[in-house]
């Protein structure tokens, strides 16, 4: 890996995590210069199928004229393991808004507070560094842990999008949540 030539993407640190930014420029660099094995190691892909999905998303285009993204790899400080991702996709810079998304790779890492810790750091980064005015979150009404996380950080439920999300060939509803910069200023001291 020729990491010394990599685009500078930024790192956010929390008590237990290092959040390494994944940007369009970094993806371009990796897929142009690294082997599949090197990309898999850097990204923490669970297996070849996980990597192929990553490669397909990149090949089909992760950004457009209107939208871009800024995601973060969640790296456990103590072990160096890449345990998940969190960040902003569907980032519409002209309108200062983005959708937040997050996932842990392994069941064993859930219920340890990692996502709570990462969410705080990423929201601060979004509002203060990226100058977002609005962060949106979508969650299945049945995903209680995700809804608790969103509500913990002051998001307001704004409605329900019927059959908004497809999973395994089934159209599922999404609860819509939003957090505005003005609301963030009021609630951030409670975090």
Image (cartoon, rainbow, N blue to C red):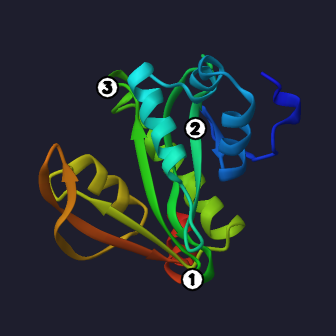
State yes or no: discs 2 and 3 in contact (Cβ < 8 Å). no
Gap in angstroms between the C-alphas marked 2 and 3:
17 Å
Closer to the eye: label 2 or 3: 2
The image shows residue 33 at horizontal and vertical percentages of 75, 30
Q: Quadrant of the N terminus?
A: top right
What kind of element bears circle 2? strand
State yes or no: discs 1 and 3 in contact (Cβ < 8 Å). no
Question: Between disc 1 and disc 3, whose residue precedes?
Answer: 1
The image shows residue 182 at horizontal and vertical percentages of 54, 83
Look at 45% across and 30% down and name the residue there. Answer: 52
Residue 114 vs residue 127: left or right? Answer: left
Q: Which residue is mark 2?
A: 73
Gap in angstroms between the C-alphas marked 1 and 3:
36 Å
Closer to the eye: label 1 or 3: 1
What kind of element bears circle 1? helix
In the depicted structure, whether residue 153 falls above or below residue 20: below
Residue 152 vs residue 27: left or right? Answer: left
Look at 16% across and 59% down and name the residue there. Answer: 141
Q: Which residue is mark 3?
A: 107
Report the residue that reaches farthest toward the left.
170
Q: Which residue is mark 1?
A: 95
Question: Between disc 2 and disc 3, whose residue precedes?
Answer: 2
Look at 60% across and 22% down and name the residue there. Answer: 36
What kind of element bears circle 3? helix
**Which of the two residues, 51 or 84, is positioned nearer the viewer here?**
51
In the depicted structure, whether residue 136 falls above or below residue 35: below
- Residue 12 visible in the current orientation: no
Q: Quadrant of residue 111?
A: top left
Neighbourhood count class around disc 2 (C-alpha, 10 Å): few under 14, some 14–19, many 20 upward: many
């Amino acid at each position: 890996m020729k990491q010394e030539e990599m685009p500078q993407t930024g790192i956010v640190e929390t008590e237990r995590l290092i959040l390494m930014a994944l940007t369009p420029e970094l993806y371009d660099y990796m897929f142009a210069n690294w082997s599949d094995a090197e990309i898999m190691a850097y990204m923490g892909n669970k297996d070849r199928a996980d990597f192929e999905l990553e490669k397909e998303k990149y090949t089909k285009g992760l950004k457009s004229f209107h939208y871009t993204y800024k995601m973060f790899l969640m790296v456990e400080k103590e072990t160096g393991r890449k345990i998940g991702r969190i960040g902003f996709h569907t980032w519409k810079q002209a309108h200062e808004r983005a959708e937040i998304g997050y996932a842990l790779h392994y069941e064993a890492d859930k219920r340890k507070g990692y996502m709570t810790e990462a969410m705080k750091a990423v929201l601060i980064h979004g509002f203060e560094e990226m100058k977002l005015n609005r962060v949106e979150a979508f969650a299945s009404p049945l995903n209680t842990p995700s809804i608790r996380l969103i509500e913990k950080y002051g998001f307001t439920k704004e409605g329900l999008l019927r059959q908004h999300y497809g999973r395994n060939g089934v159209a599922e509803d999404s609860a819509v949540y939003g957090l505005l910069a003005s609301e963030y200023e009021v609630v951030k001291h409670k975090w």
